[in-house]
Image (spheres, helix red, strand yellow):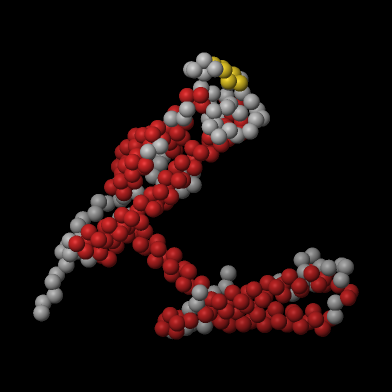
Amino acid sequence: MATKAKKAVPAVPAVPTVSELTVVESNFHTYYGDMIGTESQVSNLVIYNHLLDSNILPAQICSPKSSNESMFTKEGWDRNIEIFHANQHPNIRDWFKPKWDDVEDGGKHVDGSYWFKNTSGLKTDDYRECNKANHTALKKRASDKISNLQKGYNGYLANERIRFKEKCVADDIDPVQAERDHKVFGQLAADEKELSGAVKSKNTPLAKLAKAVQTEAKAIGRLVGAQSKSEDDKGNDSILFDDDIRDLVPTELITLLEDQRAQCETFSKAMVAFDLDPDVQDKIGKYTTV
């Protein structure tokens, strides 16, 4: 019986170029302003849809200072902060300035009440009082809002990946290959595979043995030093050569510990030197030292 052929995987738009990212950033600001102004989950969803449609990865939702992969330019990131502050309560907008030193000494609110600059004072629940604690908290909230958006986007993508695979199955498209070809879902899957491989490599028998040997060598190093030193130098970083007890420590104990330390080093060098067959490595891993 002939096997039914899978349909071709639909084409996926390429990763956005720099000029395209400018448009993505501009549209993001529009949606972000709506979200901050309304605190609406619907607005959040509009942003998430926009980011996915633009093939933006969660790691790109960050300050350009923290990553070259950021979707934001410096000006665009500053605009995010401006949008946040522009959508705060009028009583906050009356006094807030990006730098505390630029905040005026006092003034009159639109509602007729007055405010005064307080260099001390405690943070308030509504952040409306003009004091340094509220100013610091507002600046942090402006950055945290983007970080929280990144976390929310991660959760959104987890659900969308499931829907994407379900649709592939319904359309008789290979979901594995389709996800691999998708610019966002494919990268997320690749990152998960890499992370899984890194975790797995740390849990192999040889990796655990290497860690145990290194732990033993470090423990001995704390007692007699990490490597052979002159008697005068050992007292600087080893417990048994401390001036308070060095004369009370049996020479035989020092010798035994130093011999064991040397054996750990010799053993590790020999284990690292082994060129194991790939099939063997697949079963027991590799002996690696840091």
Q: Quadrant of residue 146?
A: top left
Quarter of the picture containing the N terminus is: bottom left
In percent of width and height, residue 243 lies at 87, 67
Asked whether residue 170 is in view, the answer is yes
Q: Quadrant of residue 166?
A: bottom left
Name the residue nearer the viewer: 4 or 286: 4
Q: Horizontal placement of 230 versus 138: left or right?
A: right
Residue at point 43%, 80% (across, down)? 282
Name the residue nearer the viewer: 234 or 135: 135
Query: Is the residue 69 above or below the residue 283 in the image?
Result: above
Residue at point 45%, 82% (across, down)? 283
Query: Is the residue 276 above or below the residue 22 in the image?
Result: below
Query: Is the residue 112 above or below the residue 158 in the image?
Result: above
Asked whether residue 47 is in view, the answer is no
Residue at point 67%, 75% (across, down)? 217
Q: Horizontal placement of 147 versus 130: left or right?
A: left
In percent of width and height, residue 184 lies at 32, 55
Q: Residue furthest left?
A: 1
Picture mark count: 0
Quarter of the picture containing the C terminus is: bottom right
Query: Is the residue 70 above or below the residue 177 in the image?
Result: above
Name the residue nearer the viewer: 29 or 47: 47
In percent of width and height, residue 215 lies at 64, 73
In percent of width and height, residue 65 lies at 49, 44
Residue at point 44%, 28% (across, down)? 86
